[in-house]
Amino acid sequence: MSGLVVEGWVEDLWEASILPALESYIRIPNKSPLFDPAWREHGHMDRAVAEVAAWCRSRNIPGLVVEVIEDPDRTPLLYIEVPGQSDDTVLLYGHLDKQPEMVGWEDGLGPWLPVRRGARLYGRGGADDGYAAFASLTALELLTREQVPHARCVLLIECCEESGSPDLPEHMRRLLPRIGQPSLVVCLDSGCGNYDQMWGTTSLRGMVTGELTVDVLDEGVHSGDAGGIVPSSFRILRQLLSRIEDEATGRVFPPELNAEIPEDRVAEARKVAGEIGDAVFTKFPFAGSTSPPDGDPAELILNRTWRPALAITGLGGAPAPSDAGNVLRPSTTAKLSLRLPPSIDGEAATAAVKALLEADPPSGAGVHFEAEPSATGWNAPPIAPWLEQAVDAASQACFARPALFMGEGGTIPFMSMLGDLFPEAQFLITGVLGPASNAHGPNEFLHIPTAKRLTTAVARILADHHRRT
């Protein structure tokens, strides 16, 4: 493929067609079912799927199949098939559902308001992961246009990833005969350590999530009357969390929530730390004099990718400070998000956490942990030489720098499922969620130049996949 011609065509398509379509998609508040139980009645998900499907159908790819798989009991799935020049199959993955709004957006920005500022397109879902369908199909259209052969390709774009992909196993069971046995899986829902080169994700953490509730009263009472007699539900909550986490260091105690880190992943972290150094932590908007728990970038990478970590993502049972009277509250609820090492089984970890939190409640308080569906992490199989070479060559061609590989701290539930379904497949997990892109948070953005370069890089890798034998 001629570099300048290819880059110009991809640039023009992104500017004239993809970015306007992404802006329309960002405007749709199609929150994942976990955050919008009435998603079907609201109709936002169907609208998002319809818009993306219409764009896909407009592409100039002979034999293109675009189908919306609908089920009254599940979120829809966008199934796309592109014929190839061999019987081999590549499976490409993305999702359209979004995280909720979150507070803290800058003036002039908002979750459902697409705003372009220089290289950034702000708004919820553009980078996580609405762009994936557009970039994947554009890569295939590029190969068609340049008459470069590639394998048969199947795209699966789901609508419940941010809820843990509960609908995907049944969709996969029904579609498996059509999909076949892919030799390569491509996922564009991951991160990148910078915007200067291509990144391959080698592992993903799992997750335990749920609501921990502590009840001490049937109703709130005067704090002066009850203080010293009725235990504080918040204090008991703190005690319970200390069974999981050292509040001084953030270290997660229970052995069933920890795993030995493979030597190759340790070496990988050290290599990345040597390349990007303090950027491992300087990318975060620390407040005041806040600092990370360790000054060694390699250890911080391992903290983020292979060690468990607990975050309290929501609190219930307390009024806003401006509305808080002198009342000892009857209960406190905390939403727990516990990231797990890639090799830890999510269901077993959830059962362990529930048992630890509910056993022997302090002061006899009512304690209940209502767990959400767990997620098991994923550790990539050894990378084949052809794929390692193809990713590096694509990075050199599209970014003018070599590729880097490391684990990611987030979760893509589908990867564990695919690893079990297709144990012989190779995996290319990559994405555009780099420094400050802030997926799930305020001011989320898509780094447009990276998305354009990644589109061309995926096309090159698909071509190398076809040539590998």
Image (tube, grey):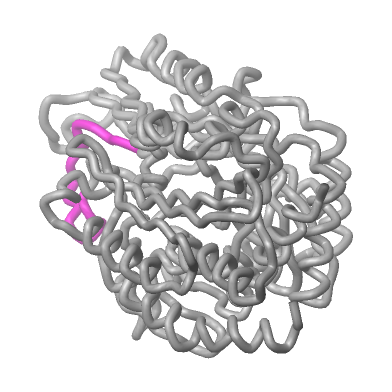
Who is closer to the viewer here, 144 or 364?
Answer: 144
Q: Which residue of the protein is positioned furthest toward the top in this rendering?
A: 360
Residue 235 in sight: no
Q: Position of residue 74 (x, y in %)?
A: 25, 38
| Residue at the image position 66 percent from the left and 58 percent from the top | 150
Give the x, y percent position of residue 92.
55, 51
Q: Is residue 356 above or below residue 92?
A: above
Which residue is drawn at the image coordinates 19% and 46% (left, top)?
Answer: 326
Give whichever of 406, 198 is nearer the camera. 198
Left or right for 319, reference 284: left
Residue 35 versus residue 7 in the image, above or below:
above
> What residue span does the magenta drawing correspond to?
319-334
Q: Does residue 160 appear anywhere in the picture?
A: yes
423 sits left or right of 1 in the view: left
Q: Is residue 422 above or below residue 395?
A: above
Foreground of the two, 266 or 54: 54
Q: At 57% across and 65% down in the image, what residue appears?
A: 140
Residue 6 location in percent, x, y?
A: 67, 82
